[in-house]
Every structure is written in structure tokens, then in C-alpha cells.
Image (spheres, rainbow, N blue to C red):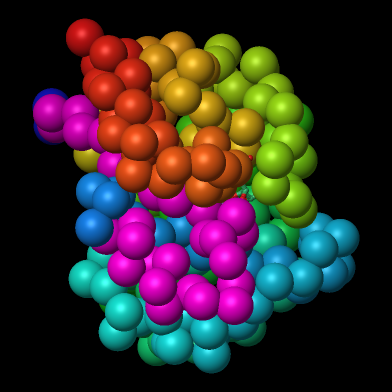
Amino acid sequence: MKTERKILLAPSLLSADFAKLGDEVKKCETGGCDILHADIMDGHFVPNITFGPLVVKAIKPHSNLPIDCHLMIENPDQYIEAFAKAGSDYISVHAERLAHAHRSLSLIKECGAKAGLALNPITPIEFAFEAAEYCDFILLMSVNPGFGGQKFINSFLRRAEALREFLIKNDLEHVIIEVDGGVKIDNVEQIVRAGADIIVSGSGLFSGDFNANTKQMRINAEKGLI
Ligand code: DX5
Ligand code: ZN
């Protein structure tokens, strides 16, 4: 099935002001973003710790934007239902932590959310090929997960190209690709050209003038679709 590509801008709340998250998510909506990217870290799978379903539930009423929970945690299956109940519209789980990926992706869908598989920068891309038909989206990390503000790892570009080619060849174009890490105004065009549809950016949007950054990010991203 051929689907028209569309850019979905997803600000990473990791770079937002946690003391006023309600206002920050409103700012994302009025600034013209499409999805709220929530980074869930447990201090085990990644060295950092962020927040859990209670915070997702707390921010939900403050905007109409869908919430994308990126689970960077051990035992993700144990928490999928809680994140879905808290209001997550998209949930991604890391390939590196899935004993039964098919079961986890099915569970996300049963809970009513869009199911995503996330891959670290050096996890074999073939994992995504096998899982693609069970996914709504595939998140390719372009930094090592754990922190905002890191440098984009270039191998994302060839990995996204290979994945996109696979999706087209296998009639799976409705499965969209998410990029996460080091995405800025000046590299987003080539990132979209390589195949990314959901553009996660934390420091690239929240540092400086958020509305101006968002506007320019979309303009540059859309250049990559042509
Ligand atoms: C990293 C997170 C990212 C991070 C991106 O583990 O998954 O979502 O917040 O931040 P930037 O855009 O600053 O690299
Ligand atoms: Zn993330």
C-alpha cells in the first residue's frame, strides 16, 4: 500500500522545563508540533532516570497532542499497560530488551496504542526487518539512549535508507520511521531524505526560540521529502 509521506514533529520533553511541564506541552501544541515524545528511563537499561506513567497521565489533559512513550527500561512488558492507561498513544520498546518481541508489540496494540520497535545505533537492522509487519513505527536511535544533547551518529542515514527500501519492497510503507537523537535544523533535511517520518528533537527545538526552531525544523524537514 503506497502512503503519502508526512513529517511529524515530536519535541522530546527531556529538554523541556520539568518544573512546568503543563505549560511546556501547551507550548508544543501552539508551536505547531504533532506528537509529544516522552523519554522513559529507569536508570538500568540507560544510566539516566526520568519519569513514569503518573507524569504521562498528568500532562495528558494539557494538550491534544498524542503522546509517544519511548520506553528505555528493563522489563518493558511489565509497564506497557500502565503507560497505555496513562494516555500514551504511541509506545516503543527496545529490541535489546525484548525476549519475545512479537508478544510485546501485540500487547501494545491490544492496549490500544501504536506499536513501535526501537533499535540502538549498532543493533542489527535485520531485527527491524523481521518485526516490521507487526509494527506501526520503527524508532532508529541516532545516539546512544540516555541523554539529550548528544551528537548525531551518521550510520543512521544508511540504516534508515536500508529500512525504507525494505518497507517499500515488502508493501509495508504504512510502517513509519522515527529518528531520535542529535536532530537539528541543519541536518534534518538529509535525515528525512534517508527515510525518517517522525522527527524527535529535544535540544534542537527547546534551546533558544522554540517557535522559530519548530517552524524552521519543519521547513527544512519538508525539503527532504522532495
Ligand atoms: C535520548 C532520547 C532522546 C533525546 C533526544 O535517549 O531518547 O529522545 O531526548 O534529545 P536531542 O534531540 O537533544 O538529541
Ligand atoms: Zn527518545
Residue 11 locus on image (x, y percent):
44, 50
In the image, residue 66 sits, relative to residue 142, either above or below, namely below
Residue at 51% x, 76% y is 20
Segment colored magenta: 3-29
90 is within the stretch colored magenta:
no
Report the front residue among 73 and 153.
153
In the image, residue 188 sits, relative to residue 182, either above or below, namely above
Identify the image quadrant of the N terminus.
top left
In the image, residue 66 sits, relative to residue 21, either above or below, namely above
18 is within the stretch colored magenta:
yes
Residue that protrudes farthest toward the front in the picture: 209
Q: Quadrant of residue 76?
A: bottom right
Residue at 27% x, 13% y is 223
Residue at 46% x, 24% y is 185
**How many marks on residues?**
0
Residue 159 locus on image (x, y percent):
57, 20
Report the front residue among 181 and 14.
14
Visible in this render: residue 83?
no
Residue 172 locus on image (x, y percent):
28, 34
Residue at 38% x, 67% y is 25
Residue 125 locus on image (x, y percent):
60, 29
Identify the image quadrant of the C terminus.
top left
Q: Is residue 156 left or right of residue 25?
A: right
Q: Is residue 114 left or right of residue 138?
A: left
In the image, residue 147 sits, relative to residue 157, either above or below, namely below
Report the front residue among 45 and 29.
29
Visible in this render: residue 181?
yes
